Amino acid sequence: MDTFKARFPWFGVGLIVIGAAMLLHRLGVVNVSWHAALWGALAIFGAFKLVTAFTTGRPGAAFWGTVLLGLGGYQSLEDLGVVYISSYLLFPWTVVLVGVGFLMMFAVRPREWHVIVPALFFVATGSIMVLAEMGHFDRWDVVEAIRQYWPIALILFGITLLLNRKTSA
């Protein structure tokens, strides 16, 4: 019961912010697009999760905080007309963002160094996919190489999990 009372009422804060935004929009004070508001809220939630991850030492929160902050932040900036990424580059950049999420997991808890393998895999794969989409590599050669050799990442990740368990014991 004490943990319930100690929690901050984020749902209540969210209702207040949404209600205030709706009221300000209806009064003509601000022009709020629901698409922009949703992505902005997602970015803020991601930033909150990221800060929480570093204060509590929870690497899973760092991963999801990074991904939500990246996706929500990009969509918000795109809605504002600040940045634009072509649609064919969105998936490769999202793959890179997932890799950065794994790197943030490592930053929160460096003793769990095994997350470096998926981090490097996703960052490298996404970067090569971006370069292929930009014409620096043949796109279909990259797709075929990823299709053929991605199990190597599973093998390396499995080895690092075994080594990490052995060194932490």
Image (cartoon, rainbow, N blue to C red):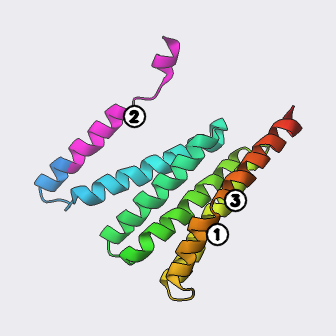
Q: CA distance from mark 2 to mark 3?
A: 42 Å
Outermost residue on the top side: it is: 1
- Mark 2 residue element: helix
Quarter of the C terminus within the rendering: top right
Residue that appears at 65% across and 62% down: 121
For label 2, the residue is: 10
136 to 21, vertically: above or below: below
Q: Is residue 20 magenta?
A: yes
Residue 48 left/right relative to 55 = left
Outermost residue on the bottom side: it is: 135
Relative depth, front residue between 88 and 9: 88
Residue 135 left/right relative to 151 = left
Q: Position of residue 51 (x, y in %)?
A: 57, 46
For label 1, the residue is: 124
The amino acid at mark 3 is: Ile
Span shown in magenta: 1-21
The amino acid at mark 1 is: Ala
For label 3, the residue is: 152
